[in-house]
């Protein structure tokens, strides 16, 4: 019977913690890389992550922790990467192990700043990983609700349907349902863009523009998402109304758990971008994703993306939210 072999988690944040809880519900043991040894020591001592979703208890006797990423990658057959995208490249550059032949699962939900690549492309180009061994985890899911065992759905994308099926089995459970897809790039680009649009949703909420306008914003964001994803990664039969696209967009644009929405809300209330960044306890990945997707679009397909450009002007060009949104109101349909 085919298996994924030994599974490793790379990352110590909320999403890595939530996914590890799912994996340990179905696997006997888990390798787990965390960058800081002091965090590992506290985790083992208190049996929970000392910083993120700390209400969730773990059987640490079944976890092989290590602060050495190469030790973990060498021992693992399947590596789940769940680090915030701004820190991904620094982590990846410390890997000296040959990753060819291993399964790589990206739960990054972001893009590689500077390289402007989705994570699976980065692993293929820098480590020679095969398309059939590259998987991606898509939403709609907040780590906090997954960790609390609230009914959730994840989409598993892979060009090899059997690999997707195998990974879905090791994270599925009574409160976690899985959906399979072969649209790896589409899921990854959608995960980046929904963070950008969640910032936009937060901004208009902070401005008290009202639910009517927020609904129009999200509706038009979905159209914009479809145009840009289809231009960057054409695929016959893609339906952006499915959960990995629309569902992830909705939960990120509206939820109180959404860092990107909360980040945008502060800006809409009058915070400077710098002040909002400093106020955030965790990374709002849409801040970095906005610049990346702006640059990707400008260098390539040049699709009409008024909401993306609106957020870019607010975050990077100093345009006020009122000025930026006034310029795009009439583009909505």
Image (spheres, helix red, strand yellow):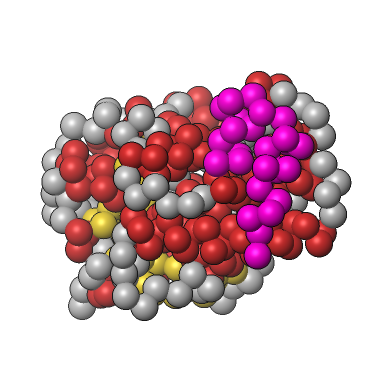
Query: What residue is shown at x 82% (from left), y 34% (from top)?
Result: 269
Is residue 201 rendered to the left or right of residue 76?
right
- Residue 310 counted in the magenta span: yes
Query: What residue is shown at x 61% (from left), y 61% (from top)?
Result: 220
Query: What residue is shown at x 20% (from left), y 59% (from top)?
Result: 131
User: Can residue 35 be seen in this snapshot?
Assistant: yes
Callout count:
0
Residue 317, picture quadrant: top right
Identify the main secondary structure in magenta.
helix
Query: What residue is shown at x 34% (from left), y 50% (from top)?
Result: 301
**Foreground residue among 301 and 237:** 301
**Quadrant into which the N terminus falls:** bottom left
Residue 263: percent from the left, percent from the top?
A: 69, 37
Residue 104: percent from the left, percent from the top?
A: 28, 53
Residue 62: percent from the left, percent from the top?
A: 42, 52
Is residue 305 rendered to the left or right of residue 80?
right
User: Can residue 257 be seen in this snapshot?
Assistant: no
- Residue 261 counted in the magenta span: no
**Residue 65 sits above or below residue 305 on the image:** above
The segment highlighted magenta reads 309-333
**Residue 223 sits above or below residue 33 on the image:** below
**Quadrant into which the C terminus falls:** bottom right
**Foreground residue among 203 and 92:** 203
């Amino acid at each position: 019977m085919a298996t994924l072999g030994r599974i490793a988690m790379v990352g110590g944040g909320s999403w890595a913690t939530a996914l590890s809880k799912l994996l340990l519900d179905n696997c006997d043991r888990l390798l787990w890389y965390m960058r800081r040894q002091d965090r590992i020591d506290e985790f083992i001592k208190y049996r929970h992550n000392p910083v993120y979703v700390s209400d969730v208890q773990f059987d640490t006797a079944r976890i092989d922790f290590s602060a050495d990423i190469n030790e973990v990658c060498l021992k693992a057959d399947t590596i789940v990467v769940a680090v915030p995208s701004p820190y991904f490249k620094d982590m990846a550059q410390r890997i000296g192990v040959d990753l060819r032949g291993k399964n790589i699962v990206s739960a990054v939900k972001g893009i590689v700043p500077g390289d402007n690549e989705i994570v699976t492309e980065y692993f293929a180009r820098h480590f020679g990983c095969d398309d059939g061994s590259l998987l991606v985890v898509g939403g709609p899911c907040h780590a906090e609700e997954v960790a609390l065992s609230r009914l959730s759905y994840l989409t598993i994308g892979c060009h090899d349907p059997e690999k997707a099926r195998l990974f879905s089995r090791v994270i599925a459970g009574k409160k976690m349902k899985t959906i399979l897809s072969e649209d790896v790039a589409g899921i990854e680009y959608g995960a980046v863009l929904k963070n950008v649009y969640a910032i936009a949703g937060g901004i208009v909420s902070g401005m008290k523009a009202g639910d009517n306008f927020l609904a129009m914003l999200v509706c038009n964001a979905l159209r914009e998402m479809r145009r840009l994803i289809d231009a960057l990664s054409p695929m016959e039969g893609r339906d952006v109304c499915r959960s990995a696209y629309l569902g992830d967009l909705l939960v990120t644009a509206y939820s109180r758990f959404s860092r990107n929405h909360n980040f945008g809300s502060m800006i809409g209330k009058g915070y400077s971008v710098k002040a909002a960044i400093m106020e955030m306890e965790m990374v709002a990945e849409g801040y970095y994703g906005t610049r990346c997707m702006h640059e990707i679009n400008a260098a390539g397909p040049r699709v009409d993306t008024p909401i993306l450009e609106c957020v870019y002007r607010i975050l990077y060009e100093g345009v006020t939210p009122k000025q930026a949104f006034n310029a795009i109101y009439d583009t909505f349909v």
